[in-house]
Each structure stands twice: as structure tokens, then as C-alpha cells.
Image (cartoon, rainbow, N blue to C red):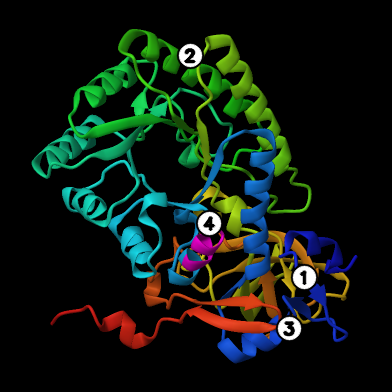
Amino acid sequence: MSGLHKLPLYPQTVAVSDRGHLCIAGCDVVSLSERFGTPLYLIDECTFRNHCREFKTEFSKYYHDAVVVYASKALLNRQVALIIAEEEIGLDVVSGGDLTIARSVNFPMDNVYFHGNNKTLQELEMALNFGVGTIVLDNFYELDMLARLVTKNNHHQRVMLRITPGVDPHTHKYTSTGILDSKFGFPLPTGQAAEAVKKTMAAPGLCLMGLHFHLGSPLFEVEPYLLALDLVFQFAADMKRELGMQFEELSIGGGFAVPYVIGDEAPSKADYAKAIADRINGLCSRLKITLPRLTIEPGRAIVAQAGVALYSVGAIKSIPGVRKYVCIDGGMSDNIRPALYGSKYEALVANKVNDVENDVVTIVGKLCESGDILIKDTKLASMESGDIIAMPVCGAYSVPMSSNYNNALRPAIVLLNNGEAKIIRRRESYKDLIRLDAI
């Protein structure tokens, strides 16, 4: 079998040229690797925008007031922020750096949600000065600090409280965030969430708009969302009855799954939307709660499929009866997900897409770690040094989590659209590596 069966994992504009080369958005990726060098990350603008629009369409179809907010931790730079603004969806940020990028392109700050479990005083001051629309409070330390700031500056700030409902999302332990034993949020089962509501409502200048939860990522099931909704809506009803809390907005976070390998089956956007909307409508009717605005925060599910990583093949090492290693010029320095989470990927030999894939190989990086493995024991077309490997579904988290381990250079990012290729993040240089050093 050739690599053609893997094409559905690639961006929506994928094609194969007459030469058997992988093409994205009308661009031959082998030519792009020659032009821009490797490792190289490609982002297909069409796929990116389509996912933004599909989330807006599907959730609005099933719920009366649904707001899409892009989770910028998946991938953010100035060009990405501009696209998000043009698509008229909100932006979920988690640091002063995220805020700086957003402001640098005049992103509408009223549509920014500021998350994070340990916001600093300087970051909260920045958020107030920039006019961030909503700050999502994660703990009592932040709550008290923000309350003092708004009182000092005679400011009024919209806030939400992040709740940890105690629901197991059935994903990797490092990406499970809605369980009781988590660094994130006010725990619901312990009574601390109720205490947070009481303190926030009593704080002059803090306008409590509603509640937020995020269970983890990626979630290949709808059921964890529904369990969390049951708990959070009952809590909201209790807080309304006991404290008079207004429940104007609910954020269910993100975590929507995407297929990474052949055989992965993720719910569709419509599946998520209908199940979540039906449950909210039913709960509000039963608990006699006015329907809140529903905010969703997809990141991976917007940008992951849009991204493809390109690598050049270098050394090839065969150990008879054991394994065949194919070494590439990147690795865990630009994509640590396999080493950190055990994440799985597929790949193609971009200049041999039509060739039969009958060579069992392990794709490894050039970093000085035995764990620097991107794909283990996969079938690919027969390779030689200089071939180009293309890994799909690399738009989310790969580059944001990249590092200079072994003083590797972070890769360039190229935006593709209708046959045009545009650098949106240049490759680091060796000068970049030393420019912050002092001797």
C-alpha cells in the first residue's frame, strides 16, 4: 500500500503532484523544503480558517448564544493572531507574552480571556491596562490580588471562576485538568468553589460573569463534558439560591480531539455541539436557570490539522533482526509531544507519496536522548539520505513547546495559501542563540 491512505490526516488542501510529491495549498512541499530549509513547519491557512468557521457554525446551530475563543497555547504568533481577529473569534491567553503578541496586532482586547494558574502581579496589571475583557480567576491568591488592584485603581473587571468539577476525562494524566487533584481551579467537591463565589461577589470592582471548567485534552469522548455540566449547573443553581449569583456565561474550555493516526475516531464538531447544547438546555429547564452564554475554547481542533512538519533524512542505521533507524534533522527540540506524552504520529516520504510503504522504520531525531523518537516502527516508502519526511497534524503544541536543547535552532513557520508561501516566523540563527548571553 502507498501513502495515499494517510492523506485525510493532512490539511484540507492536500494533493499529490504528477511527480509523486506531496502538495499543500498548491505548493510542492519538497520545493518548500529546498527553499526554506528543514525542519520546517507549514500552516495551511484554508484549513485553519475552515476549522474556525466550522466551530462557529456548528455550535451556533445547536445553541442560542455560543462564542468561540481560540486557545492560543496551541499556536500563537502575530500572523495567527491576525487570522483569529479576522475570523471574529475570541482569544484565550495565558501569559504576558500572549498578551503582548495580541496587543502588537491590535487584537480586540474585549474579546480576550486571560487564563493561567499563577498570574503575576505584573501580568494582572498588564491585563487591566490593556483592557482585557475577561480574567478567569484560578485560585484565591489571584482573586485577592486582583481585588486589591481594581480597588486601588477604581477599576471594574469582568471575571469568571475556574472550577475543577472532579471529572476524569480519560486522557493522559499530564493533560487531565478537571480532576480533583489538579493545580488548576477551585475544587468543587471541597467547598472551595463556593467560597470563591462568595469572596468574588463581595469584592468591589469584580464583576462575576460566570463559571469556567476545562477537563483536559484531547477528549475523544463527549461523556466527560456531560458529567461536568451536570455538576457545574447544579453548583450554579445552588449559588444562585444561596448567594444570588448571576450565571451569565459558562465556558466549557476546549479539549476537542482530532485524529492523529489512521484509526483514530474523534467526535465531529456537530457531535460535540449537539450533545453539549442538548444537555445545557435540559439542565436549565430542570433547574430553572436562564440559559447562559456558552463559550468554547478550541485550540488543537482548529490548528492541528492545518500544520505539517517537514524533515530531511540524514543517517540511516539498520540493526539486523532488531530495528532500522531513520535519523532526521529535527526531533524532540521541535516536537516534544512523543517524548512527553507518548503521542503517536503518521508520516509520508514527501517525495515518494505513490511508492509502496513496506519498509518498517523508526523515525528518530538528532538530539542526544534515547527518548528522541518521533515515530516508532512505522511502514514508509524505502528511503535514502536527502529524502523529505512530512508529518501531519503538527499545527498544535509542537512549535510552542519547542526548545533550544542541544542548542538546536527553532524551526521556521511558513503560511500557505492558494499557491503562495509566506514566512510567518523565521528560523532562529546561531546569533539568536548567543544574543542574550552575558560574559
Query: Horizontal and vertical percent for residue 241?
Result: 38, 8
Q: Secondary structure at mark 1?
A: loop
- Crowd rating for badge 3 (residues with CA inside 10 Å; few <14, some 14–19, many 20+): many
Mark 4, Cα crowd under 10 Å, few <14 / some 14-19 / many 20+, is some
Q: Count up the numbered dots.
A: 4
Q: Earlier in the sequence, mark 2 or mark 4?
A: 4
Question: In what element is the residue under mark 3?
Answer: strand
Q: In the rendered structure, which disc, 3 or 1, sits on the residue that comes first in sequence? A: 1
Residue at mark 3: 28
Please name the amino acid that badge 2 sits on.
Gln
> Which mark's residue is nearer the viewer, 2 or 4?
4
Q: Is residue 26 left or right of residue 16?
A: left
Mark 3 in CB contact with mark 2 (< 8 angstroms)? no
Residue 291 is left or right of residue 405, and the answer is right
Q: Which mark is residue 271?
A: none
Whether residue 54 is situated above or below residue 25 in the rendered picture: above
Neighbourhood count class around disc 1 (C-alpha, 10 Å): few under 14, some 14–19, many 20 upward: some
Q: CA distance from mark 4 to mark 1?
A: 26 Å
Q: Main secondary structure of the magenta part?
A: helix
